[in-house]
Amino acid sequence: MATEEDSTTRIQRRAPRIAADHPHYKWVALSNTTLGMLIATINSSIVLISLPAIFNGIRLDPLQPGNVSYLLWMLMGYMLVTAVLVVTLGRLGDILGRVKIYNAGFLIFTVTSVILSVDPMHGGGGALWLIGWRVAQAVGGSMLMANSAAIITDAFPARQRGMALGVNMVAGIAGSFIGLVLGGLLAEWNWRSIFWVNVPIGLLGTVWAYRSLHDTGVRRPAKMDWWGNITFAVGLTALLAGITYGIQPYGGHTMGWTNPWVLAGLIGGAAILVAFCLIEARVAEPMFPLKLFRNAAFAGGNAATLLGSIARGGLQFMLIIWLQGIWLPLHGYNYADTPLWAGIYLLPLTIGFLAAGPISGALSDRYGARLFASAGFVVMAGSFAGLLLIPTNFSYWVFALVVFLNGLGGGLFAAPNTSIIMASVPAEARGAASGMRATFQNAGMVLSIGVFFSLMVAGLARSLPHTLSSGLMAQGVPAGNAHQVANLPPVGTLFAAFLGYNPIQQLLGPHLLSTLPKTDAHTLTGREFFPHLISGPFHDGLVVVFALAIVMSLVAAGASLIRARKAPADRA
């Protein structure tokens, strides 16, 4: 029979190695939550860069008209789900315990990574398997994103929060760019490896989180706001899904904004979100405490988060298209290799984040967060202006310097912006505030695709058909075929460049190419014909896209300077 002493020994062995009141506990919390943010954000971009390998692996042509939806949902489903769920899960963390929800997120994320890697089907079935389990994986990712900032805020004293949040946020933002390089490398080996890589990291993080983290924040019992949760999820999903389908062609139009289903999603989603706000203003325990927006600093910080996320997300997609569709082929890279090299050539952007983020967080603790957050957006605006000034076929060192400055600006504002938001709320609302901040950030990424792709497609639609038609006919393509190809929706051309395909080879098809003289066919499908052809129209689109990004960045800089009339008492 076990003695009382033996029982005590077993309990001590199962206990976490570092207690919540240990001086080093805050560093354990920071390192684990940073790992969680890193794996959650790497996962969104690692799939982005690996889409050609994934679709080849499941034997599905992503450029066939009927398969575009698979491509978009593979790309955007994860971000949409995280945008919808982070507030709910942040609120649940306030009620049940932030660490409990966070730990469950690590476990779900790891298990779904295993399931994704063993996709047994091909074609549309294989795509639906991946989309469905990516949605489930996004639930785990949402749990990590919604509670990591709140756990750090609970663990660190006010004088060190900016530094700690800086490390955490820069890891999250940099993860989206690290995933581009990592996905390109792994996809060259085996497309399933982009999911395998999550498994050992997820297992380590899960065991570590369950053994080491403690709920040290304020926690109070409350009822779940089911009507608020339902209307928020339905409204935001309808709105973001409408934006997703709005960039697809419809009824002879280059985009689908006149599609009745798209209009229903946009109008209906907006109406349901209005109903959500009315519900939240009346229920006793709202999931989305609207009263927090009475604090001007909280409202301004979240507005800056949304605008910065839209600008940064649009930049990422435009730069990938620019590199893969134009610059890399002009400099001798095969289309099949451009996804990997696009990630490598964007490393200065990641380096800028990594260089500025922790330093900015630490300095903002000492000198104030608002100045650094605002300065970061101003630097980003200047980098967007620089991208407008360089030619389409640029000198790489100039491009590298400009995108480094963009990363530097992003790193400057990330931690101070988060610190402004988290410091403007009472301790018991930190989980909800963290989830709300993450919602604006993730919704901004989805919105960026709709906004920037729409602007780029609109710009291309004005000049690309004539340029493409005349260029094809100059190489011997019959006028009828040239006009037919030139009048196809520009979004197909963008997606081809985005995925590392030779667009002309895809658009003309092997049968038509076989009827042309070999020299003309070789020119048409060579590395330089399409990049030279699209350079002018693409730059016209970039002017509109980056001009909007400059405006968004400057407005975000102003929003970051807003001060609260009275800071909340820190009761942590």
Image: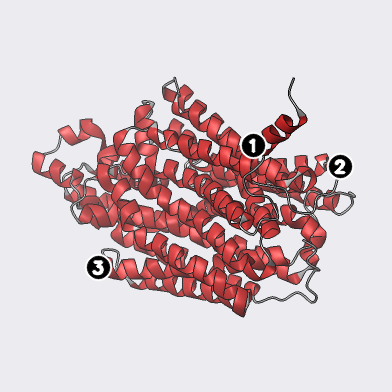
Within 10 angstroms of label 3, few (less than 14), some, or many (20 or more) residues? Answer: few
Label ID, residue 223: 2
Question: Quick one: label 3 or label 2, which is nearer the N terminus?
Answer: 2
User: In this view of the protein, which residue sits in the foreground, 16 or 404?
Assistant: 16
Residue 198 in the image: state x and y as whole percent: 47, 38
Identify the amino acid type marked 3: Ser
Which residue is drawn at the image coordinates 73% and 35% (left, top)?
A: 8
Residue 290 in the image: state x and y as whole percent: 80, 58
Label ID, residue 13: 1
Q: Secondary structure at mark 1?
A: helix
Mark whose residue sits in front, 1 or 2: 1
Q: Secondary structure at mark 2?
A: loop
Please state if 381 lies on the left or on the right of 524 as rendered: right
**Label 3 close to label 2 by CB (< 8 Å):** no
Residue 523 in the image: state x and y as whole percent: 15, 47
Mark whose residue sits in front, 3 or 2: 2
